Image: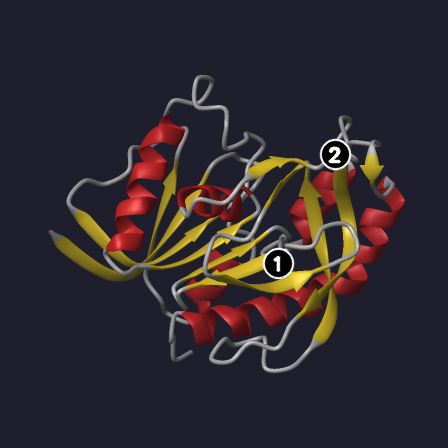
Amino acid sequence: METKSKILLIQHTDSSTPGVVSPWLEKNGREFDLIHMQKHALPRDVHYENIIICGGGMHVDQEEKYPWLKDEKKFLEASMKNGSRIVGLCLGGQLCAQILGAEVYPHPQGWETGWHTVHLQKTENLAGFEEDRSLMFSQYHRYIFEAPKDAKIIAHNDWWQTQGYVWNNQVVGFQFHPERDLEINRLMAEDRELPNEGRTHTKEQITQLGDLHQPISQLWFENMLSGFFKLRI
């Protein structure tokens, strides 16, 4: 099996992109492969040491509608067993949680959208979690995950107790979107189907809060990825 040290980015929809990740890697001369699950097949007999899984509008229980979800789950499970370091974002975090045996299901009160405070819990040997702190992150999800068995909860807020987890110092799952860039944030604000059930923000709030908090979110996420993947950039 071929092993690649470059980062694999897995994308599910055109509107949920790697965001700030790909330009940051390009700027710092780091190689990566990008696979769009609705356009490309996952590689066979290739092991990636580092993987980032983006979000998407589908859910982990929609395998009949999106048959490639089965292939992705098998690929991720094999990658975990082979020691890959993985960061899952929203849907990506939900997929990893389910693979690790955790429950994933709709929040009983509806959606969480907009920019909301997330409390980060001090966690040893995890960049970005050197101390307890609170930051504002982009949210756009209806489904939520429990923490997998033997995982540590590393982020929470008053909407859901598990906004992030780390498993085996190898897999990190976030419910929020630290990868969100300003362009995608503005497109989200203009979404005509923007949910209004649950804890949601208006178009104006999403735009204003994004302009204010996205640069801080981006810097935090770049630092977290650099430490987690042990990138010297």
Residue at x 78%, y 40% (from the top left corner): 189
Mark 1, residue position: 178
Q: Is residue 160 visible?
A: yes
Relative side of 169 to 160, left or right: left
Rendered location of residue 40, percent (x, y): 33, 32
* Circle 2 SS class: loop
Nearest to N terminus: mark 1 or mark 2 = 2
Picture layout, residue 233 above or below residue 63? below
Looking at the rendered structure, the kind of residue marked 2 is Pro
Discs 1, 2 touching: Cβ within 8 Å: no
Mark 1 crowd level (few <14, some 14–19, many ≥20, 10 Å Cα): many
Q: What whole-number distance in Å separates the C-alpha atoms at marks 1 and 2?
A: 24 Å
Q: Is residue 210 visible?
A: no
Residue at the extreme left: 1
Relative side of 133 to 171, left or right: right
The residue closer to the viewer here, 106 or 52, is: 106
Mark 2 crowd level (few <14, some 14–19, many ≥20, 10 Å Cα): few
Mark 2, residue position: 108
Q: Nearer the viewer, mark 1 or mark 2?
A: 2
Rendered location of residue 87, percent (x, y): 46, 57
- Which quadrant: the C terminus? bottom left
Relative side of 229 to 81, left or right: right
The residue closer to the viewer here, 66 or 160, is: 160
Rendered location of residue 141, percent (x, y): 67, 40
Residue at x 40%, y 43% (from the top left corner): 99
Looking at the rendered structure, the kind of residue marked 1 is Pro
- Quarter of the image holding residue 11? top left
Rendered location of residue 166, percent (x, y): 49, 63
* Circle 1 SS class: loop
